[in-house]
Image (tube, helix red, strand yellow):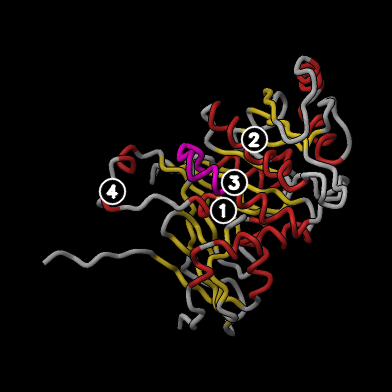
């Protein structure tokens, strides 16, 4: 008799302070909240792996004997990103020849030890992978992540610039991207002859961590009767098209037009998410779309919008323990 299938794994831990834990895992580690059960919250780590925290009284001091290991090839990138966000590490990344790994350690608000690790042991690459023929691909919406931060720090293949029609720099996100990328970006933009509202053009990223910048011009809000919805949708659609045409695997968006251009945030969110998810349905090579929100209100609106269209939103909210 064949072994019954195991669909997901969830590791549950206790926490004294659920709100501080939530901020750390959602804002610092940028994990998606998969399910909020009140006193228990479950975060999506990767594929079918989840991490849950339940509010409980705990003895004082760091919990003994527990290490949460996040395996990634980008240990150094994670270290720099979290260090720059103010996270304290026990030590910089280092090689451990005994176990054939490269790793570093930090602690979450509960004192749980978190290890960020890369396997250098070649046997890890040859480990059993399970029955990959029965694994389901990630749904398009599961490839979208909402984070709060500075888009110029993103390490995706491309970041999207909410530009003006001249493409020669401006305020807000546009100015920040030009400053971070350096004068070569402006020189490249001068050769593009501007960009019409709703369209998109691509350049290299120059001094940015991202390899490319996709420039798109969002609509100025004029009451909603001047095709603003259609033009905003076109921005996201054309940016995703360029990403696919250039074989990019990851892309980060700002919230286009909801700043100085005055497009109502609650109206912009469903348009953005609809177009991104629709594009992902046609472009399986794009593995990750990140929506990078500068302020708390924007983050909350996109996070709520994404939760509303996520399949997990239809699951019953029964206690897990």
Q: What's the distance in space between the residues labelled 3 and 4, CA to CA? A: 27 Å
Q: CA distance from mark 2 to mark 3?
A: 9 Å
Q: Indicate the secondary structure of the residue bearing disc 2.
A: helix
Residue hosting label 1: 105
Q: Residues within 10 Å of mark 3 (few under 14, many from 20)?
A: many
- Quadrant location of residue 193? top right
| 113 sits left or right of 191 in the view | left
Q: In the rendered structure, are the residues bearing label 3 and label 4 in contact, judged by CB atoms less than 8 Å apart?
A: no
> Of the numbered discs in the image, which one, if any, rests on residue 132?
4
Q: Earlier in the sequence, mark 4 or mark 1?
A: 1
Look at the picture and state if 314 lies above or below 276. below
Q: Given this view, does label 2 or label 1 mark the residue nearer the observer?
A: 2
As measured in the structure, the alpha-carbon distance from the residue carrying label 2 to the one carrying label 4 is 32 Å
**Residue at the top extreme?**
191
Residue range in magenta is: 276-287
Q: Is residue 279 magenta?
A: yes
Q: Position of residue 189 (x, y in %)?
A: 78, 20
């Amino acid at each position: 008799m064949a072994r019954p299938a195991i669909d997901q794994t969830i590791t549950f831990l206790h926490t004294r302070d659920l709100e501080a834990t939530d901020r750390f895992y959602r804002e610092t580690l940028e994990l998606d909240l998969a399910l909020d059960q009140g006193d228990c919250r479950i975060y999506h780590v990767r594929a079918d792996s989840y991490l849950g925290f339940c509010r409980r009284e705990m003895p004082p001091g760091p919990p003994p004997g527990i290490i949460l290991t996040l395996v990634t090839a980008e240990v150094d990138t994670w270290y720099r990103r979290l260090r720059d966000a103010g996270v304290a590490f026990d030590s910089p990344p280092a090689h451990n020849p005994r176990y054939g790994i490269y790793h570093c350690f930090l602690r979450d608000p509960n004192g749980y030890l978190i290890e960020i690790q890369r396997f250098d042991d070649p046997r890890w690459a040859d480990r059993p992978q399970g029955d990959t023929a029965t694994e389901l691909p990630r749904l398009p919406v599961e490839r979208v992540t909402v984070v709060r931060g500075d888009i110029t720090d993103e390490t995706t293949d491309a970041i999207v610039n909410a530009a003006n029609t001249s493409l020669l720099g401006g305020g807000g996100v546009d100015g920040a991207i030009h400053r971070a990328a350096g004068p070569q970006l402006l020189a490249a933009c001068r050769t593009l002859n501007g960009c019409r509202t709703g369209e998109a053009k691509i350049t290299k990223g120059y001094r940015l961590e991202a390899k490319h910048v996709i420039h798109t011009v969002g609509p100025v809000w004029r009451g909603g009767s001047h095709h603003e919805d259609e033009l905003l949708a076109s921005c996201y659609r054309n940016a995703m098209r360029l990403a696919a045409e250039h074989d990019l695997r990851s892309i980060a968006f700002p919230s286009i037009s909801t700043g100085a251009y005055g497009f109502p945030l609650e109206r912009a969110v469903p348009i953005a998410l609809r177009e991104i998810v629709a594009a992902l349905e046609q472009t399986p090579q794009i593995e990750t779309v990140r929506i990078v929100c500068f302020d708390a209100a924007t983050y909350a609106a996109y996070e709520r919008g994404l939760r509303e269209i996520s399949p997990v939103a239809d699951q019953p909210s029964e206690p897990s323990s």
